[in-house]
Amino acid sequence: MPLKEGFVDGSKAVWPLLIGVVPFGLVLGIVAADSSIGPVLGYATSIVIFGGAAQLATIQLLDEGVVAAVVIATALVIGSRHVMYSAAMAPHFGEFPRWARYALPYALTDQAFAVSIVRYQDVTEPVYKRRFFTGAALTLWGSWQLATLTGIVVGGQLPQSLSLEFAIPLVFVALLVLTVRSRPEFVAAIVGGVVAVLAISAPYGLGLIIGALSGVAAGLLANRIMR
Amino acid sequence: MSAAMVILIIGIGTYLLRFSLIGFVGERAVPEWALLPLRYVPPAVFAALVAPAVLLQDGDFVLLPAANPRALATVIALAVAWRLRSVAATIVAGMGALWLLQAVL
């Protein structure tokens, strides 16, 4: 397979995923335009964080006036799944030049990881692998920037009565369903949700983290029992 | 701490999480038990984000559709997400259900 096609192959591989990415980005932009942190900082999250779920939670918690340390902790708990992707990518990225090992992880999103790890099962050439990831990541990055910017511009024009902030939990509903693929994951979700509701009056907005960590513990327990 | 500072720190933290194990290539492989908990982070976190947002109103547990149409709209969105496995369809179904319930109730 010709090496230079790697970039195009990577770009094409993410096209079907844009059906999910673009509406998510639009919602993020709309919510950001409406929030108390404003459109400029809201958009900045797309460049500085570049991770939809963490961005959405960050904007929501900052808007609610949650303590800074808890906003940071919550966003990093949400982002901790990337360590798993990092582990899976390490043997492949280890073959890349130094600059790529440092630069490309910035764009190691759920979608870029998903298409690349599947492709890497069939290819061995490091240059092709690097170009494939770069093509996928740049396409996702560009689409995400365009979608969030469009959302911010459109969001300012839409009336409050549409209750568009409800789109935040809806995005998380979709991501939730997509990540529950086994019984232990189902247990993790149920316990995470129930505990987060029960812990709602925990100080400093810590309820989310308490719920999430309880869910993870329950998932691990279920994995032991159900195996 | 300013919102800009919070966003910057989360950005740096997110990069470090993504770089983490790529940065340690050549050292010992990470044992699977150490990564297992991370598998349960996405479902636990997403459920913990959704449940309080749709089941509570001003800190009180409200399920009655007339008082809290979001709970029922979320159930409909869940069903659509389950069937179609699509982010876009879930947003459309959930917003549509909410607007319909707000108009009817």
Image: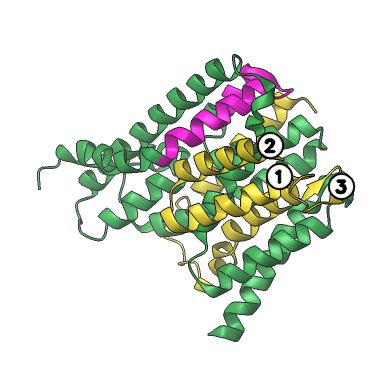
Describe residue A185's horizontal placement relative to residue A206 as left or right: left
Is B81 on the left or on the right of B52, as rendered?
Answer: left
Q: Secondary structure at mark 3?
A: loop
Instruction: Give the magenta range.
Output: A20-45
Residue holding disc 1: B69
- Proximity of marks 1 and 2: CB atoms separated by less than 8 Å: yes
Quarter holding residue B41: bottom right
Disc 1 chain ID: B
Q: Residues within 10 Å of mark 3 (few under 14, many from 20)?
A: few
Q: Which sits in the foreground, A168 or A103?
A: A168
Q: Position of residue A223 (x, y in %)?
A: 58, 78
Say above or below: B71 vs A27: below
Residue A220 in percent (x, y) is at 62, 74
Q: Earlier in the sequence, mark 2 or mark 3?
A: 3
Location of residue A178 with respect to B57 vertically, above or below: below
**Residue ID at (48%, 58%):** B82
Of all chains in the rendering, the one displayed in green is A
Q: Is residue A112 visible?
A: yes
User: What is the secondary structure assignment of the residue under circle 1?
Assistant: helix
The structure residue drawn at horizontal position 70% and vertical position 25%, both measured from the top left corner, is: A35
Same-chain check, marks 1 and 2:
yes
